[in-house]
Amino acid sequence: MNIATLQESMYKLIVETSTNLPRDVRRAIKSAKERENAGTRSAMSLSTITQNISMADDKVSPICQDTGLPTFKIKTPVGVNQLEIKEAIKNAMIQATNEGKMRPNAVDSLTGKNSGDNLGLGLPVMKFEQWDNDYIDVRLILKGGGCENKNIQYSLPCDLEGLGKAGRDLDGIRKCILHSVYQAQGQGCSAGFIGVGIGGDRSSGYDLAKEQLFRSADDVNPHEDLRKLEEYIMETANELGIGTMGFGGETTLLGCKIGVMHRIPASFFVSVAYNCWAFRRLGVILNPETGDINEWLYQEGDNIDFAAEAEKELAAVETAAAAEAAPAPTNREVVLTAPITEEQIRELKVGDVVHITGMMYTGRDAIHKYLTDHDAPVDLNGQVIYHCGPVMMKDEAGNWHVKAAGPTTSIREEPYQGDIMKKFGIRAVIGKGGMGPKTLEALKEHGGVYLNAIGGAAQYYADCIKSVEGVDLMEFGIPEAMWHLKVEGFTAVVTMDSHGNSLHKDVAQTSLEKLGQFKEPVFN
Ligand SMILES: O=C(O)C[C@H](O)C(=O)O
Ligand code: SF4
């Protein structure tokens, strides 16, 4: 095989997967968008998401800043040198990272050091298999951390919140799968896709679940019971009302694929792999002689160009507006510039749309831990913290540029957030998925607000960042450093206010009530 050609093919696969959402995923998002009622938070979030997908297309930049844990599945004919393929993938990964198509995402689990090039112990994951065909099949999934953290494994029998007893049968399995969607809420950037593995042991069960994510979103399960179950889950999960980003809405689940394997008598696992809407997985067929790409996979059906769709929508809205008066905006819109006063914060209520102009500072896991027992590198009084680990590139003059910068899951900072806000006088935090009771209490006491940005909309937010004014704590690595960002019109929704209101708390409660409606047996 020609090593240079092979490497180029792997580079193309990585870049395409990170920047160009597959056709089947686009179609699922489009139909979700059509189901939402105009003007709702979910509909607006889906518009941001589709705009983001188009921007990633145009700029050939990461759809989401979390380019995930790269997992390659490779099938080769007998006689192909797998070591060469490994080497080509590693080199292609370094190149894609250097060019800002991948975020440096490989972190030493013991020291916390980021390797900087996406290589590390066990990374990228590469799983080889031999087969009878005379071509090479390489598939790649870039599954981000926020949705990975929402994977869940059930051991039957068990008792499930809202659903009661789940036994060792098809109906017990049904309950586990429904529960898995409920427990993810908006934190894994809903609406999501789930891959389910029934049976196996703890590790093969999860492998089977992840394997389902390689199925095309609109295939039909050949196993009749599983086909029915997939169909039932799609209908029922979408009645939970969790909606895009957990804002409430008609679509909570975009796809459900279920696989089964045997188990041993004592174990009965149901494993669920949750994938966010930014479902990045592609594949190629390679010529084993040359290493060239012969064919791209997942290319069936229409390809949705969301930019063209947006133009059509705009034209329709303009015609409608001409025919009848345009509907009045339902949400209050507020412009904020840091430093923000307590008085300004106290005026904000859940549902308000906030546009931020001026400075904000990124801070995620490492920074929050650091700030508990250190001084802040900058004066954070009245400032805005953004839970974000961006993709950054340095130009030849030494200036940093933002390549992708959406929010990360905020709940991880729950143990620290309230104390840090009070200690430094921070007035607003921006993230996604919401935070818990400790933060809600601190917002009330101190006069703070939680703003929800749209998870995965990394290009959309990168566009609002006008300059990088500085960076601190680079020793934590690019995603974890504190970046000083100057923004213009950075839009987010108040989902937790200083009066004790939390949209996340409300949606969790109403979705639990709805989950309870599916308690009665369906499949026995
Ligand atoms: O690491 C990130 O930037 C985001 C992560 O995928 C998340 O969803 O929290
Ligand atoms: S931020 Fe959201 S869209 Fe991006 S990888 Fe995490 S879960 Fe997926």
Image (tube, rainbow, N blue to C red):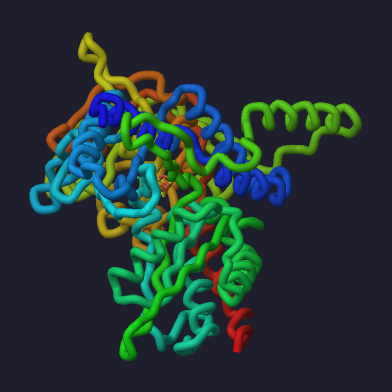
Q: Quadrant of the C terminus?
A: bottom right
Give the answer, above or below, for where 475 lies relative to 260: above
- Where does residue 499 sit, x and y in percent of width and height? 49, 56
Residue at 50 percent across and 67 percent down: it is 258
Q: Relative to residue 319, is residue 257 depicted above or below?
A: below
Q: Nearer the viewer, residue 372 or 235?
A: 235
Q: Relative to 346, say whether 6 is above or below.
A: above
User: Is 386 situated left or right of 419 in this image?
Assistant: right
Instruction: Examine the image and state in which quarter residue 456 appears.
Output: top left
Residue 153, horizontal then vertical, whole percent: 36, 72
The image quarter containing residue 104 is top left
* Residue 310, x across and y down, in percent: 68, 30
Q: Residue furthest left?
A: 111
- Quarter of the image where the N terminus is located: top left
Residue 177 in picture, x, y percent from top left: 50, 72
Q: How many circles with numbers are drawn on the protein?
A: 0
Q: Residue 90: in sight, yes or no?
A: yes
Is residue 408 at least partly visible in the picture?
Answer: no
Residue reaching furthest right?
323
Tell me: 259 left or right of 75. right
User: Which one is nearer the viewer's eye here, 215 or 267?
Assistant: 215
Between 509 and 371, the one nearer to me in the picture: 509
Could you tell me which residue is drawn at 15 percent across and 38 percent down? 115
Q: Residue at x 63, y 79 (%)?
A: 517
Please name whichever residue, 269 or 398, is drawn nearer the observer in this view of the structure.
Answer: 269
Question: What residue is rendered at 29% in x and 73% in y?
Answer: 202
